[in-house]
Image: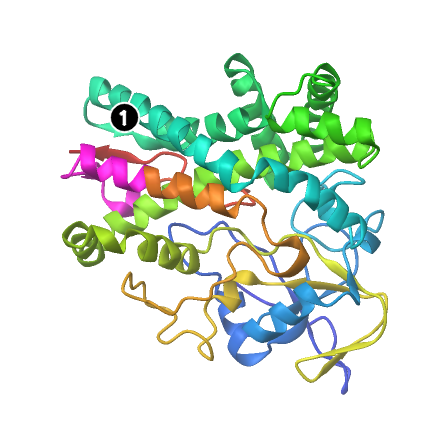
Amino acid sequence: MTTTPLTDLKDEPRIHFWAVPDLTGLDFDPLLARLLHEDPVTRVRLPNGEGHAWLVTRYEDVKFVSADPRFSRQAVYGRSITRVAPHFIPMEGAVGFADPPDHTRMRRVVGRAFSARALETLRGHAQSVMDRLLDRVEEHGPPADLMALVNRPFPLAMVSELMGVPEGDQPLMGRWTDGILTAGAGREAGERAKADMARYFTELIGRSHGTGQEFLAAVLADAVDEGTLDEQEAVGLAVLIQIGGAHAVRNNSANMIYALLTHPAQLARLRAEPALLPQAIEELLRYIPHRNAVGLSRIALEDVEVGGVRIPKDEAVYVSYLTANRDPAVFADPEEFDIGRADNPHVSFGYGPHYCPGSMLARIESTILLESLWTRFPDLRLAVPEEDIRWQRGALIRGPETLPVVW
């Protein structure tokens, strides 16, 4: 991993070229680690787009930028900002590109689908889906690839159920999601997959008008009928929730299993003290570097001081939730994976207006997966040495290609 200073002007911060390597397992990006401690508000250039952007890495600075209205997501769209992926992930008009009050209006609609009552209904469905998947694992016998048999189909089934996507269409959703969230596929493939998924949800929402059903496509259709959303906003929300719910949980849940299997002392403690599972999930969320590099940037609407550094108006700013979760000013021994960590204010689901609306669903899925997996297979272990696990290349959300296990 190398960084190249692109400017040596006396009073200008250096620009680090961030190649974003394909990292394996739970490895933390070495550039991110160094910047957190040595250059916490700095400038970077990423593989795609143009120019440079600011990168903010410390916990309090990350929270500040994430919540301060002087940093705009809406102002990002249409600019060729330096970025990881060759294409933008959210669609134009989607909630990911919105600022309050538009963002608040859109989030309110989505909140209906993530209500406590709706999630409790989904919990029962999730357990039923998981039981069927583990039946198939048992029938398959060891060795078995958990990515293919559990981690891929489980969150895809759950978010599809939430959206109202029929089971027969779930493989399409999986292929489109992979195309959108794999930087290595290229801009054309990513944009084509996004357009195909958008057409699908345009039709699904169109068929859902006036049905009175509770799945999210129908909720979005009702919001369009009420004038709360326009069609483009509704489709953008659907696409973002579908790809996030399927892909992020798929990879992060696989990373959770891998982390426990490669930290036997922590797994043994969890097996001895099952009441620690909720706390263990929070620590897994904090510890695992679940994404490569950074997500979507923001634009400074005026000159703003962050961590003692002036960020000029109209310049792009990224925050790193990964480094915020390793900030020693907040987390004792942040490099250690410790399921006994009780004080754990991690920001793995973001912070501020763009806090992930599916965070509770992700926690429910993770709880059911880990609890069910070790209840059914108490002697679960990797089928190959950990260094032989293959990891996805060019992925925006990190995870193994396969996760072979025996029991």
Q: Work out which residue is located at the far bottom of the displayed protein and give it.
A: 10
Q: Quadrant of the C terminus?
A: top left
Residue 103 falls left or right of residue 147 = right
The reply to whether residue 4 is in sight is: no
Residue 188 drawn at (x, y percent): 72, 31
What secondary structure is found at the residue carrying circle 1? helix
Compared to residue 84, the image places residue 313 above or below, namely below
Residue 309 drawn at (x, y percent): 72, 81
Residue 135 drawn at (x, y percent): 25, 21
Q: Which residue is mark 1?
A: 134
| Magenta stretch: includes residue 371 | yes
Closest to the observer: 101 or 326? 101
What stretch of residues is rendered in magenta? 369-389
The reply to whether residue 127 is in sight is: yes
Please report the residue visible at 47 percent of the width from the left and 51 percent of the height from the top: 290
Residue 196 drawn at (x, y percent): 70, 22
Please report the residue visible at 76 percent of the width from the left and 46 percent of the height from the top: 105
Please report the residue visible at 80 percent of the width from the left and 37 percent of the height from the top: 228
Quarter of the rendering containing residue 374 = top left
Please report the residue visible at 76 percent of the width from the left and 51 percent of the height from the top: 49
